[in-house]
Image (cartoon, rainbow, N blue to C red):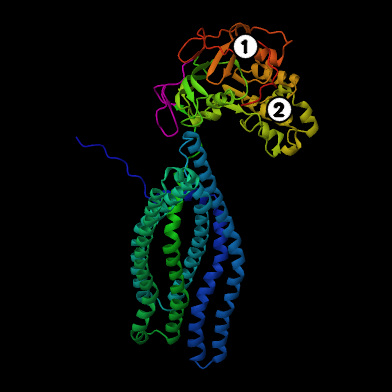
Amino acid sequence: MKAPRTARRPGPLTRVTRDARPFLRARTGTVLRLAGWSLLEFVQTFLGGYGVARALDHGFLAGRPLTGLLWLAVAAVAVLPAQLATRGVFGRLADLVEPLRDGLVRRAVSRALVGALAHPTGTTARSLSQVTHQSEIARDGWAGLVLTLRSFVFTVAGAVAGLLALEPRLLLLVLPPLGLGAALFLATLVPMAARQRDYLTADEAYAAHAGRTAADLRDIAAAGAADRTVAESRELADAQVRAARSLARWSGVRVVALAVCGRFPPLLLLLGAPWLLRNGLTPGALVGALTYLTQALAPAVQALMTMLSTVGGRLLVVLDRFTDAPPPPAEDGEDGHGRVQGHDGHDRGAPPPRGAPVAELDAVTFAYGPAAHPVLDRLSLTVAPGEHLAVVGPSGSGKSTLAAVLAGVETPGAGSVRWLGRPVRAADATSVRVLLPQHAYVFTGSLRDNLRYLRPDATDRELAATVDALGLDPLLTRLGSLDALVEPDRLSQGERQLVALGRAHLAAPPLIVLDEATSRLDPAAETRAELAFAALPSALVVVAHRLSSAHRADRILVMDGPRTRCGTSAELLRTSALYRDLAGLWEPDEPLRDHGRSSGSLRENGRSNGSSNDVVHGGGVRSTPPPSPV
């Protein structure tokens, strides 16, 4: 039985061409305008040789010098429109070049962000090299290639048309060496691209090594690893040198191809001149053919081959390195068996079961460094659909860390985090949760665009409901309309938080995490905002800075570093000394309410909530300032 064939990955030229086609189709008008300006170059080339031939045959050699001068004047005047067309050519060139660079930069940034979300500790300097160095290589190379290829096409077309007009038999001597040189040149494309790819890979490896070395100089010196680091640097530099030398050897082969294309046609024409003259070729046609070969064809071929040999291979390799940038995440769909598959076709497991927790931590441990004390230590927590959970604790107790881990921003060192019964994936982030930090993000644009940032398809009725629910009416009145320009610097901190809250409220994902996101609001505005979120079907996790915020929650999680306690307000007043401290510290006169929600869904260190995990600090009311965000 034969083993199944593994599909071959397309070559770099195929991959780049596949991505280039939609790019060029979208700019068909620009390409046509560029070709229109280039027609003047075709006319200049045609008249250059044809005018010389007619000046000799019908002018000077026929005893009519005035006619000869007129034909030479026509050939000379044809240069002027071609020079005037240069401005139009460069204007259209910018319309092709700048969008390419912008698109490559977006791809590199997309790759970096997706990679950072998927592997926060595995970032490299590759994307930095692509944004700062390789995108500029691509822009300059693409501009040079378009200019050279355009000039080559219209120059060769003008020269071939002129040779046909003078004497078709001339092509019998001109085309064979051109074809031989072109074939030899094309044979070097694949190995040259491979050598160029090796060189860029070595360049990226050296750049990444240099970046790591610069960041770790103190550790290298402390560990006495300088010799080893120097040896690694030398090895990477030698790899670059070897790649450059291999590239230079193949460049020598291209020089031979260039000589065959550029030097052989005039030589063969001179060697065959006696035969051509005996068979009816006029002296003027012979000189005109030499003019085409030496003044048009040879320079155009040389320019094209030089461009392709020095820039073309590099451009192909650089563009190929951008072809594997991640596309925007596609929505997961179900196959015929009810299993979830991503856009790449890989199995994502069974769909989330009905009633599955919105978010779940299972024995999660997190520390800021290998030798650091854990901020979260084997913490297990379940957040049910529609639940309202408040997180309280003193400064530095790990509240913001818990919010980041729960939202998938930080990856735990041990344990697992699940959303809707499935492991956390970066592609699910925007559809499953919203995390609002204390410092709200508002961009320059209309209020409508700011509110619809996470949900662009929201209707005006839904926008109005969000504005009313969160109390954004005063800000809307001051701005004048939803389409009024929002300038972040002219908003107060509280107004910024309200805009960010409106954005999350309008999106209404299954999980909303507010990490001190209402800290700049007055108590009344904060109450209104939290009640608006509580009315949504989403699960709500609030890092609270006022005890009134905790009272509105179904459950309260008390954190003091790795020690945690969870329950209702009344339960925690009986079982947690730290919570009694915080209650007296924040609002000693506020009556405490019990919302009656069971606290059995949190475990610490594998034990149930009934174990002795309380944090005991003594029974008095502390006089320190209220706790601030972690």
Range shown magenta: 334-354
**Residue at the spot of label 1:** 618
From this viewpoint, is residue 16 visible?
no
| In front of the other: 577 or 41 | 577
Give the answer, above or below, for where 101 lies relative to 53: above
Q: Is residue 237 left or right of residue 561?
A: left
Q: Quadrant of the C terminus?
A: top right
What label sits on residue 498 in the rendered view? 2
Give the answer, above or below, for where 112 lies relative to 347: below
Q: Is residue 532 left or right of residue 291?
A: right
Give the answer, above or below, for where 522 lies relative to 345: above
Within 10 Å of disc 1 (Cα), the crowding (few <14, some 14-19, many 20+) is few
From this viewpoint, is residue 5 visible?
yes
- Return the residue found at the far bottom: 63
Residue 77 x %, y %: 59, 78
- Taking the magenta stretch, the answer to whether it contains residue 290 is no
Residue under the point 54% across and 53% down: 28
